[in-house]
Image: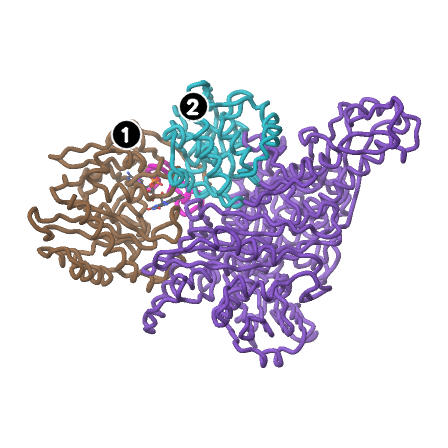
Amino acid sequence: MAASTTNGFKVIGTRPIRHDGVDKVTGRAKYGADYAFPGMLHGKVLRSPHAHANIKSIKIDKALALPGVKAIVTADDLPKLPDKMEAAGEQAINLNHLSMNILARGKALYDGHAIAAVAATSSHIADEALRLIEVEYEPLAPVMTVEDGMKPGATILLPTLRNKEDGPDKETNVAAHLQFKRGDVAEGFKQADYVVEREFKTAMVHQGYIEPHNAIGIYNADGHATIYCSTQGSFVVRSLSAAVLGISEGKIKVVPAEIGGGFGGKTTVYLEPLAVLLSQKTGHPVKMTMTRAEVLRATGPTSGSTIRCKMGATKDGKLVAAQCWLAYEAGGFPGSPVGAGAMTILAPYNIPNILVDAYDVVVNRPKTAAYRAPGASNAAMASETVLDELAEKCGIDPLDIRLINGSHEGTPQTVGPPFKRIGLIETIEAIKNGEHYKSRLTGPNRGRGVASGFWFNVGLQSSATINIHTDGTVSLVIGSVDIGGTRAAQAMIAAEVLGVDVNDVRPTIADTDSIGHTDVTGGSRTCFATGWAVYEAAQDCIRQLKERAAKLWEKKPDEVVFENGMLSPAQPGGDLKPMSIKQIAPRLARTGGPIVGRATINARAVGPAFATICVDVEVDPDTGKTQILRATIAQDVGKAIHPAYVEGQMQGGTAQGIGWALNEEYFYDDRGILRNTGLLDYRMPTCLDLPPIETLIVEVPTPGHPLGIRGVGEVSIVPPPAAVANAIYHAVGVRMTELPMSPSRLLKAILKKRAAGETQAAAAD
Amino acid sequence: MANKVIVETTINGDPVELLCEPRQSLLEVLRDVLELTGSKEGCLTGDCGACTVVIDGRPVCSCLMLGVEAAGKNVSTIEGLATGAALHVLQRKFLEHASLQCGICTPGFLMSAKALLDRNPNPTEAEIRYALAGNLCRCTGYDKIVRAVTDAAATMAGRSSRTAHGGAVPAETASGMVSEMLAKGEDK
Amino acid sequence: MHAITYETPKSLDEAVKLMAAHGEKARALSGGTDLLIQLRAGTRRPEYVVNIKNIPELTRISFSLQHGLKLGAAVPCIEIHENGDMRKYYPGLTEAAHLIGSLQIQSRASVGGNLCNGSPAADATPALIALGAQARVVGPKGERMVPVESFCLAPGRTVLQPGELLVEFHIPAPERRASDAYLRFIPRNEMDIAVVGVGAALTLDMSDDRVVAARIALGAVGPTPILAAEAAKSLIGKPLDAAAIDNAARLAIAASSPIDDMRGTAEFRRHVVGVLTRRTLAKAAERARE
Ligand SMILES: Cc1cc2nc3c(=O)[nH]c(=O)nc-3n(C[C@H](O)[C@H](O)[C@H](O)COP(=O)(O)OP(=O)(O)OC[C@H]3O[C@@H](n4cnc5c(N)ncnc54)[C@H](O)[C@@H]3O)c2cc1C
């Protein structure tokens, strides 16, 4: 672990116990499903057993007749919304698609698509009622891959879907085609001494949070509704639920419960509007929770993809041209992260000539949702393994080829202005100089791989309020839910600025009525943007504290300074003694009343994140099974506020990336039915599947941010699949172009290579 | 049909008489009947371990057991892990090592780890990882969890002669620990 | 889940009467690690759930070198692993039981439930078949012994008739220079259902390394667990060298009839049957020689 210097900071860079810690190790913390209200009913969702079908009729009378059943709703109970992009709160979204994903209207678009929802006096009765709802389906041919969706004459999922290129008259499954260009690739490839081109396929994978989605809706007779749920963004839940239900945003209050993981998958709504709707119909609070099978069939996942990647380099390893083609599965409705894939695929490198085409394709799979650096891991799997091949052809160390071409301040981005100060090079150097990469890896069927990755990060809106109490402690109120140490990090920022003990700051996460708008805990934005708001709110406190001290001292506010937690007169001398916050706090009432510091921001100046990872593997050549022996990740985090939770983000993303690399995948049968609807067969890594994950924190401060913070949440998931693929190649000499690199796939490749008579494994070292 | 039955059991050391439907799982009984919501539901199929409780000394997924089966058994849940206001060493070490991010899997991990250390006070890293393989964590990559359990075992071994409660420390010192860690810098 | 009535008989007699009275409407509940999932999914909907874990015959392990092993159908897997005789004399069966799920699962799951659930991928079943285990079944019409290799009929279907209970397994006493082994292939390192499982039991000649008796059983490569009789027979009377093992592996592959599914392709499974047969035989032999 890199020593995180505290350079000048007292609190930032230390590792205090998180403020919600005791609640979370004693079982006291309340997650969404832990709430209960008097008279509460339980809601359940009936889901389509078909991947693609017209819904001819839904008969609910038998189900309604079951004792204990209180209400049943279908799409007919929801307002029909315009079929076009519209603002819902801060996002632009096709509300008709959102609504149709919550309850299918006329057509079921994937196995697990919600058809109807029931409220009953117990979850068991609600489950039994689902069996009594009679739905007549007319099954249609499922479209499961981007290739099938894009081919001429393909079965159409959404009859009204159009794209710009094909015009207003052509039915299509291609929701969008994006293109990014720089220079002239044809000319560029002419300069190349080596060109590598490969096609990749990556499987659809799920975020895999351990807590299933949940929501409690409480509709009041006065037309106001309250939603309790585990979400990454209470304000998003509010605006999207309001839009789907056709009620105004201000009439909904969302109370964010503790959240059991999200990784992007809890930034939209599934159950929330249904719980409110059922509550409205029954007059009771309605609680809804998903089973794991529902989570896998109908929430999340991120896109499977087909990617073609061609890169050219001169003999000395300089990249001269790159051309990429990406098609991502959007799921039943448009909106895959293919744009992000296209903009990240070449971002780590300075390449004069590029051409990137990207396609968003609807298929009969669940509508994809954000997943940690959405779209970037798929893309990096392609570009980072092609680069590894080029390095080998050029006879250059794979880290060196990254150093030769790596993006730095001033390098043009695929889209937008050139990079400001970034830390890619530093992460590569951290790996190169680290003990892991310098160590020798010995033994048969073992190999080492490296890869780098990029993620944009976002800024967006946050609000923060700080109340100073009469005992000098402060309460910090934010709207960002705590998904992994947020309270601690935010309290640390407040404590640092105010010069108080971190335990004298009590952080609270407020509901949507009690704090200003705050965007999702996601996009690696929370520490960056909410942290910025907290920093400013603390500054606001200091400004007011100076006014109060000035009043007490009969001076002007600008004759008071605040340093190291002490207020003191700017001109020393006299008998005025410096005061701490604890000392002035009891005197606030007499100097004008309480102090509330507040700040809201819409953070720009986002600092992009880079990471480089080194992975050692051992492959069993008889079964194709890969064991991860060692993994080290170096990541530029700007400034690590709470290094332990920063390491946690780096380790967690690495673990997810390794799961994606080796075993995780959605397995659909010929009829488009998901076969692995449980965690036993979805195969996320257990603790026996991972080594200790080593972390190297690199700190290249983000210019413009008062603390230099850079988002740390996402980029760690980007390089692992490619690094594992590169390691496998160096272990057994096969280039894997498909994710996951499961034993079946890897063994097939190994046997094919053996059959081809190439017994000589590529030298690992 | 859905006749409720009376179940006499022991939960966290206390005798409990409760009323439940035979179809209710122990997890449902704990959460919905007894309002002990510390045991979490992650999958209902025994794959994630978030609902782990300890029954007669063994870790069990409470989602894969009927509530009525708890009759006559000794059930320990996360709510009973601390002794009064004193956190169990495992709880303390999870906090010190930042072993939780979202925290939903934490009660299950703690109960599995408790069952392990009660049987094997000095486990190897491999034994720890094996004992925790039935608990999924999606946030941490397990590294900090394994470190916390290793550290807890060492701490308990060192202290077992001194404290009666398996090395439990008062919860109040949780904040005291903060300053202690600040002093140490805690950079490993 | 639908509503159920729960019964918890204290004796085998009482249990058999209850099971007989309710026939098809009743299901035995052992560890519940398969049954509860099926009840919740609605794939089994019995009205009566009969807990069999309070019946002495079903919950004990009795072993002697003269009479061999009687293993209660409802003994939790973890108790098998904790039993010194089991680890010493039936290491293959013990390791199979110890592979089932996590410690949480093993604290509940039984070998009887593993077999009665009728999954072709059940880990304990090939190990039982390799050992030549017989299942003692008691029902309304009396008692019968069923060789474990004939117990499963199809995925999820067994020879058990409505009202019948599996009471225990009878396994012969181990011979000298005999042992067993069970290996499975899974993509992760724990918490997975076997993609292929191979159990083997071997008895070696007292003076040389010739195979006196052998049984090989395969899991997850057919609609039921498979006794690979030809493969085992090919070893008899031969020294257990690489050629003999290779030949047995080939015959084991021939005995398998795997399908493509989410856990692996048929092609992959066939290959791995060969790999695991070799490894399992080597392991059983190594143990027998000890
Ligand atoms: C997370 C998880 C992981 C798992 N991993 C594995 C694994 O690695 N390998 C593996 O093989 N299995 C695995 N399983 C499946 C399951 O745990 C095993 O099959 C287990 O052995 C079943 O035993 P049980 O006692 O729990 O059976 P139960 O669920 O109680 O019973 C199973 C079926 O058998 C019937 N039955 C049980 N006992 C009797 C009896 N004595 N007489 C008549 N009928 C009876 C029941 O009515 C039911 O239909 C796993 C399950 C889970 C949830």
Residue A40 position, x and y percent, is 61, 35
Up the image or down, A106 lies above or below A686; here it is: below
Up the image or down, A348 lies above or below A548; here it is: below
Residue A695 located left or right of residue A457: left
Residue that label 2 marks: B9
Dot 2 crowding, Cα within 10 Å, few <14, some 14–19, many 20+: many
- Helix, strand or loop for disc 1: loop
Q: Quadrant of ligand 1?
A: top left
Depth check, mark 2 against mark 1: the one in front is 2
Dot 1 crowding, Cα within 10 Å, few <14, some 14–19, many 20+: many
Kindly identify the amino acid type of the residue bearing the numbered disc 1: Ile
The chain to which mark 2 is attached is: B
Image-quadrant location for residue C3: top left
Kindly identify the amino acid type of the residue bearing the numbered disc 2: Thr
Q: Between residues A305 and A572, which one lies in front from this camera angle?
A: A572
Chain part drawn in magenta: C23-49
Quarter of the rendering occupied by the N terminus of chain B: top left
Chain C colour in the picture: brown
Discs 2 and 1 carry the same chain letter: no
Is residue B122 visible in the rendered structure shown here? yes
Residue C271 position, x and y percent, is 29, 62
The chain to which mark 1 is attached is: C
Up the image or down, A222 lies above or below A74; here it is: above
Colour purple, chain:
A
Tell whether position A139 is magenta.
no
Residue A640 position, x and y percent, is 64, 44
Residue that label 1 marks: C55
Chain B colour in the picture: cyan
Tell whether position C43 is magenta.
yes
Residue under the image location 51 percent in, 43 percent down: A127
Q: How many labels does the image show?
A: 2
Q: Residue furthest front?
A: A573
